Amino acid sequence: MAYEIKSVKNPEDKTVLEQKHVPFIQAPDKVKKGEYFEVKINMGKEIDHPMEPGHFIEYVDLYANYYQLGRTTFTPEAKAETTFVVKLEESCTLRAFTFCNLHGQWEAKKEITVE
Ligand SMILES: [Fe+2]
């Protein structure tokens, strides 16, 4: 098995698996230093990932670069969607890592400017 974290390979032609699994990060492009803001994350963007006992999103982690800001865990009864409220001290890359019990780890990122 390859230790692969999957992401969108071609944004113009996303596969169905990519549409269901890649985290969709919704956050401002610019925020003020030290002020709380919301980061909403859905799995996935175009298609809601199934949430049933045999196949579900187990968690999503949010990072600023490689510093962990938080984690939301899900049961099959939950929607694969969460909102973190965070603050930042400097511009960084927000990264979301999610885990599907059948399809493994998926990553998305978004640049964010702190002023
Ligand atoms: Fe899956």
Image: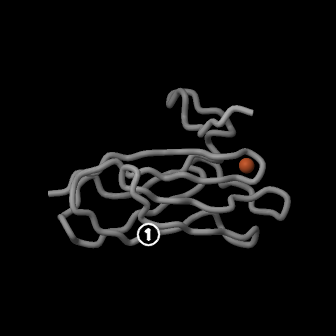
- Residue at (70, 52) in percent of width and height: 100
Q: Residue at x 45, y 63 (%)?
A: 40
The picture places residue 99, in percent across and down from the top left corner, at 65, 53
Outermost residue to the left: 115
Give the amino acid at mark 1: Phe
Q: Nearer the viewer, residue 109 or 43?
A: 109
- In the drawing, does residue 96 fall left or right of residue 15? left
Q: Judge the density around disc 1: few (<14), some (14-19), many (≥20) Cα neighbours within 10 Å.
A: some
- Residue furthest to the right in view is 54
Tell whether 42 sits left or right of 63: right
Give the image location of residue 86, x and y in percent: 35, 69
- Residue 92, horizontal then vertical, whole percent: 29, 50
* x and y percentages locating residue 88 in the rendered image: 27, 63
Q: Please name the residue shown 38% across and 72% down the image.
A: 85
Q: Secondary structure at mark 1?
A: strand
Mark 1: C-beta under 8 Å from nearest atom of ligand 1: no
56 relative to 37, above or below: above
Above/below status of 81 relative to 11: below
Image quarter of residue 76: bottom right
What residue is pinned by disc 1? 84
* Residue toward you, 51 or 108: 108
Give me the residue at 62% from left, 42% from top. 19
Identify whether 63 is placed above or below 8.
Answer: below
Q: Which color scheme does this rendered protein use?
A: one colour
Name which quarter of the figure residue 54 lies in.
bottom right
Q: Quadrant of the C terminus?
A: bottom left
